[in-house]
Amino acid sequence: MTLMQNFERLDDGEAIFLSPAMKVTIGIFVIGPTLLFLVGFIPMLAFGLVSWVDMALLVGFWALTAIGITVGYHRYFTHGSFKAPRGVKVALGLLGSMAIQGSINQWVADHRKHHKFSDEIGDPHSPWRFGISRKAIAKGLMFAHMGWLFSEEQATVDQYAPDIRDDKDLQRITRSFAWIVAASILLPGIVGGLITQSWLGFLTGLFWGGIVRIALVHHVTWSINSICHVFGKRPFDSRDMSSNVTWLAIPSFGESWHNLHHVDPTCARHGVFKGQIDPSARVIRTLEVLNLAHDVRWPKPQRLAKKLKDPAMAPRLRGYAAEVS
């Protein structure tokens, strides 16, 4: 893998440009939840404005919207790791949209372009675009984490996600994105208010299950773009700098086993070694058992063993012993 320096060059026909108004809109949803979280977190704790209901709302809505991103936007819509009936498709599209990381169209287009040019010219969010010095990598980490969202260069949906563009169900969801955003923020508050029968319960539910949850899901997802392309282990031979970061596995629902993902992007399980926790793969397995997912692309241990840098690690692959026996 060659680290390119001239990342500012655009790929003709493969990029669009953001208007100033769109950049402001993105800023509100990218920076807003984080700022509100930072400003309100300590006062909310200091005044005891947090309860088991708030924590349940935080964890519950975090899990639902994180699954919408990891299982829905990423493994299903972007990479086609499995097939599903219409109801599951729509549900995953709605849950992913509630994470407030943009429309399905643009998310899929950006991620597919990332895989095409991973850590090279054309990658929308490589942390290596400014060079390999410590200062350049520090700047690159910030860019890959959230700075790229304001970049002039965005992947074109027509080129990278025509299948999503042409899906009528998904386009209805995209057109309803503003309403879904409102629901994502307000629903935890409404549920909290109903459970506690109070306006205070509404406000604390909105803060913890809405604002805090959105900020957490955002930063965990963005950490895959930044942290998992600089730090961690790389047991597989990939053409880029994708890596595995163990401590991010549970918060990211298994997305941080990123090295394998870049070696085998359509694989439904990213944590392929024994002991690697991958909650998203468990969700897909559950859907499969319930006949709500089919044609699941589960990892093939012997095929993956050929991609290992150290062949001696092959027995650690899930299912490897059974395949070779």
Image (spheres, grey):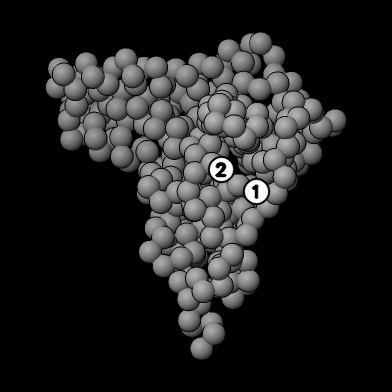
Left or right, 171 with reference to 223: right
User: In this view of the protein, which residue sits in the foreground, 28 or 61?
Assistant: 28
Instruction: From the top left corner, tell me how far across and down residue 8 is, in percent.
Output: 74, 26
Whole-percent x and y of residue 71? 51, 50
The residue under label 2 is 229
Seen from the viewer's position, the closer of residues 207 and 13 is: 13
Which element carries disc 2, helix, strand or loop? helix
Categorize mark 2 by other alpha carbons within 10 Å: few (<14), some (14-19), many (20+). Answer: many
Q: Is residue 300 visible?
A: no
Q: Residue furthest front?
A: 133
Residue 43 drawn at (x, y percent): 22, 16
Query: Residue at left 54%, top 41%?
Result: 230
Residue at which label 1 appears: 240
State the residue at coordinates (39%, 58%): 277
Amino acid type at circle 2 is: His
Residue 91, x across and y down, in percent? 50, 45
Q: What numbered label is drawn on residue 230?
A: none
**Are the residues tagged 1 and 2 within 8 Å (C-beta)?**
yes
User: Which is nearer the N-term, disc 1 or disc 2?
Assistant: 2
Q: Residues within 10 Å of mark 1 (few under 14, many from 20)?
A: many
Dividing the picture into quadrants, the one containing residue 194 is top left
Note whether 68 is above or below 136 in the view shown.
below
Tell me which amino acid carries mark 1. Answer: Asp
Q: Residue at x 85, y 30 (%)?
A: 12
Q: Is residue 32 visible?
A: yes
Decide which of 187, 136 is in the foreground and name it: 136
